[in-house]
Amino acid sequence: MRKLTSIGTNTKLCAVIGNPISHSLSPAIHNAGYDALDLDFVYVSFRVEDIKNALAGMRALENFRGMSVTIPHKIAIIDLVDEISDLDRNIGSINTVINEKGKLIGLGTDGPGALKAIRDAGVNLEGQKVLMIGSGGAARAIAFTLAQNAGLEKLTLLDIDAAMMNKLASDLKAGTKAIIESDMLTDTSLSANMKQADLVIHCTPVGMHPKEDASLVPPQLFKPGQVIFDVVYTPLKTKLLKEAQMHGLKTISGVEMFINQAVLQFERFTGADAPEEVMRRVVMERLNS
């Protein structure tokens, strides 16, 4: 590992912001990549509530190169950056900020990271019915990516937050050609939609450390051949994934999406090809320890 004495006036700073943030593996994965390539970068984590002033600080600090953004700031931060693509603006959620000489450029890597994780698992999305539980920042990114690129038969949203869910459904209908349905998350709606879904994507914090004993999907609702994708990656196997595996279902851990999106961020921050295997090994070692 790099010595603190090697950090100097030219060292580039990157960070992850969120609240809570203590569970994040982003510093470990990015710093391992910097070490492997001998890059003059360092990556830290900050618990942040005031994102407006956090970005003002980033803008003011010349060496503050990149920022990863996690819960609960992925949606609010979109109005605070200087430049963003039309696609990411339509998504309405970003997880990455690049500092280009005081100009803050926002972008998203969650959606592409999730799509790669699904395809790497051997799942063919063409003509499939997808059920998405949750409609926050990560859900928005994944939903738009799948609706635009995956050839789905239908994407159904369930959430307890009607306003957030309806906004996502409306934006998806306006910004994509996919068939979009939505409903309030209840025992009845969950049961009905689980009977149809080929792929279930869980996009809420339920099951995340320190509440590992929780799951929104009762195991009796699983159906044969279903694929279960949980975006939570701490713990590595959530209760939802464990129960799905016990029922013989194919599962996709959020760690795959996490690694994929981190690789994309690393390359945007540094301009170098990410040492993906090094980064993967560090994450898996931490999660299995």
Image (tube, helix red, strand yellow):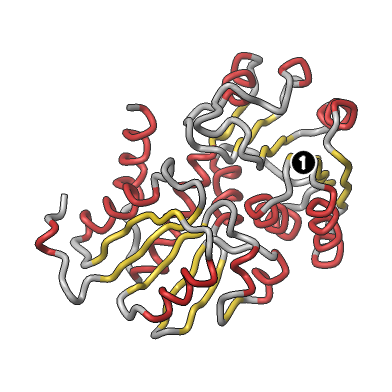
Q: Secondary structure at mark 1?
A: strand
Residue at x 65% of width, y 62% of height: 75
Residue at 85% over, 54% down:
166
> Can you give x and y, in whole percent of width and height, for residue 92 in the image?
69, 65
Q: Is residue 195 left or right of residue 24?
A: right
Judge by depth and name the residue closer to the eye, 181 or 160. Answer: 160
- Taking 287 as reference, is 173 above or below it? below
As drawn, 226 above or below 29? above
Question: Dot 1: few (<14), some (14–19), or many (≥20) neighbours within 10 Å?
Answer: many
Residue type at the position of mark 1: Val
Q: Left or right of 165: which side holds 203?
A: left
219 or 55: nearer the eye?
A: 55
Tell me which residue sits at (59%, 25%) in the image. Answer: 241
Q: Kindly identify which residue carries mark 1.
A: 130
Which residue occupies the foreground of this view, 234 or 128? 234
- Is residue 153 shown to the viewer in this render? no
Q: Position of residue 179 (x, y in %)?
A: 87, 52
Q: In this rendering, would 164 be left or right of 111?
A: right
Which quadrant of the view contains residue 156?
top right
Horizontally, residue 96 falls left or right of residue 166, namely left
Identify the image quadrant of the C terminus.
Answer: top left
135 or 176, nearer to the observer: 135
Placement of 270 over or under 16, stated as above or below: below
**Could you tell me how many numbered marks the image carries?**
1
Residue 112, quarter of the rendered image: bottom right
- The answer to which image quadrant residue 190 occupies is top right
Residue ID at (50%, 54%): 18
Q: Position of residue 102 (x, y in %)?
A: 42, 84
* Image location of residue 68, percent across then percent down: 46, 60
